[in-house]
Each structure stands twice: as C-alpha cells, then as structure tokens.
Amino acid sequence: MLNQTSLFPKNTAGYDLHTHSTASDGSLSPAELVEAAMACGVHNLAVSDHDTLGGYHLAKQHVVKKDLGINIIPAVEFSSRWNTRDPDDGRGMTVHIVALHIDPEHLELHELLAMTQQARAERNARIKHKMTKKGWLDVFEHAEDLAEQGQLTRTHLARAMLDLKKVSQYRQAFSRYLGEGRPLAVHTRWPNLRESISRINTANGTAVLAHPLHYSLTRKKLLQLCSDFKHAGGKAIEVITGRTNKDMIEQLCGIALRMDLLASVGSDFHSPRNGVAQLGVQQTLPDTLPAVWSNWSN
Ligand code: AMP
Ligand code: MN
Ligand code: MN
Ligand code: MN
C-alpha cells in the first residue's frame, strides 16, 4: 500500500478536514465558516461539529444556494470513550474521532448521533445539577443561551463562567472546574471506541483519530491508543492540526507510517478570535504518507 503513495496528491493546500461552527462550539455560523474558509484558499472543507451533522447541512445549503466553488465534506467530531485495558469497556478517557466523508443519511450514523447526543444531554443535566447546588444556575442558563440551537458544550460553559466573572481567564474554567477530576467534571457515557468506529465504517465514513497529541499521553499510551484505534477499524490519524509544530508533525507521521494509518489534516478551527488554530493547513505531508482523501472518489 505504502509503495503506491507517490500516485496520490500530497499538497494539503486547499484542505481543512476539521472545523467547527455555531452548530457546536464554533463562533462562526456554517455560512460564515464557508465564506471564511474560501477566503483562506480552502476548497475541501469538512464541517465537523461535535456530535452533530447540523453544521454540515447548513454549510452545504449555503454552497448550493450561492453556487460556490468549494467542496463540503460530510463530517462529525464524535466524542468516544477509550479504555486502555478493554476496548469494549465504556469507561476510560474521552477521545475524539472525526468521521469524514460519511453518508449523511445512513441509519448507523443517525444511531451514533442519537447515542452521543443522549450522553451529552445526561452529562449536561448532571452539570446543571452541580451548578445549581453551587448557586451557579445563572451560569448554566447563560451557557444555554450562548449555545442557542447548537450542541451545548463545555466551551459554552467556560465562556459563561468568564462572562459572569466566575473566572478571570477562559482556560481557568477548565483548570479549576471543568477539567478531568475538577469539581464540575462528570463521567459521560460516550459510546466506546469500537462501537463508534464500527458505526462510522458501516455508514461509509472514514474514522480519523483527532489531535492525538492533545490527550497528554505518554509515548507508550499514545501508541496503544493508535493501535487500539487501528484494530477497531480506524483508518487515519490527524498529523497536521492548527497546533502542531514541525516536531509534532514528524512524530505523528512516524506513528501513521508505522501503524499503516492514513494522514488527515485539519485546523480544528473554532473562532477567528482564537489565534492558535486558524483556517486552512499550511504544512505539506511527506511523500511517503498517504493522505486520508487518497481513496475518496469525490
Ligand atoms: P465537550 O465536547 O462538551 O466536552 O467540550 C469539549 C470542547 O471544549 C473541546 O472541543 C474544546 O473546544 C474545549 N476544551 C476542552 N478542554 C479544554 C481546555 N483545557 N481548554 C480550552 N478548551 C477546552
Ligand atoms: Mn470544541
Ligand atoms: Mn476535539
Ligand atoms: Mn474539534
């Protein structure tokens, strides 16, 4: 497989396969995201909101209505649980899987969306309960207002804490309250890695392990995650994101080659105000590494 890689395009210019809109925790509407991506030279855009296809549908509608020259790839960033000892066990840590080029109508996709949205609703109810006991119901309600019709995420809760002066910096909301082991963290029953990937595959999607270096894992654990991901049917890992430097990209390319995983590229763009991850991908993939879009027919 790897010998054929020179047949495939490696130029990542024009690709961004991981972005967020107001359908989840992005700050641009899907239509604004499309326009901003085009202005950055992106021609293949995956609108990959957390646990919803809503952003994709609205982005696609905008492109059709305005007859724009940009390809919108159906995508979702799924929350999933990974257990280091037993991949079938739903406990463990949360990892994100970007499902790309998926059949937006497929029943298996809709079942997985229903499962993750249900887990999110249960989690948010438990966070609301904790916040109410703390006298912070107004913070929770403000977060609901910020999310409007989109998925209510911890990003909205963090922004609400900042707006209502419960923290002085956005990051503090995670380090003090929402992060793992903190007082407002609650266990969430996301579908496990194997089930999530299996459903993505059945719905003709490509399962991509999102931002592998964001999970603060030791090298040994990271390799175990990538190996479990591959054995569960995962096809690719993100090797270039908005926050990867040259050394990180090299490390991730090495893992992808070693595990025979395809390479994906995506900024994980959330907002133009966040200077870290802007739209589009500047770096190119090495010739030896097949890109995730290599085997897509359109
Ligand atoms: P949720 O899916 O509701 O758990 O929210 C996860 C989102 O919160 C991520 O996609 C990030 O956008 C954001 N997030 C998670 N952890 C942090 C952190 N430590 N600092 C800033 N943003 C974070
Ligand atoms: Mn997010
Ligand atoms: Mn993520
Ligand atoms: Mn993301």
Image (tube, rainbow, N blue to C red):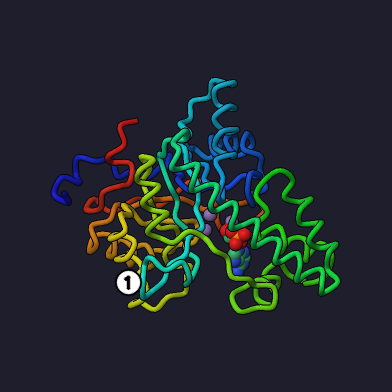
Q: Is residue 164 visible?
A: yes
Left or right: 161 as drawn, with respect to 111:
right
Please rate how many residues cluster around mark 1, counting C-alpha atoms within 10 Å: few if below 14, some from 14 to 19, many from 20: some
Q: Position of residue 103 (x, y in %)?
A: 42, 35
> 52 above or below 135?
above
| Residue 233, image x, y percentages | 30, 54
Nearer to me, 76 or 198 = 198
What residue do we see at 74% from left, 46% from top? 148
Nearest the eye: 137 or 240:
137
Q: Is residue 256 above or below residue 53?
A: below
Image quadrant in which the C terminus is located: top left
Residue 268 appears at what percent x and percent y?
52, 53
Residue that label 1 marks: 224
Ligand 2 located in image quadrant: bottom right
201 with respect to 211 (left or right): left
Q: Secondary structure at mark 1?
A: helix
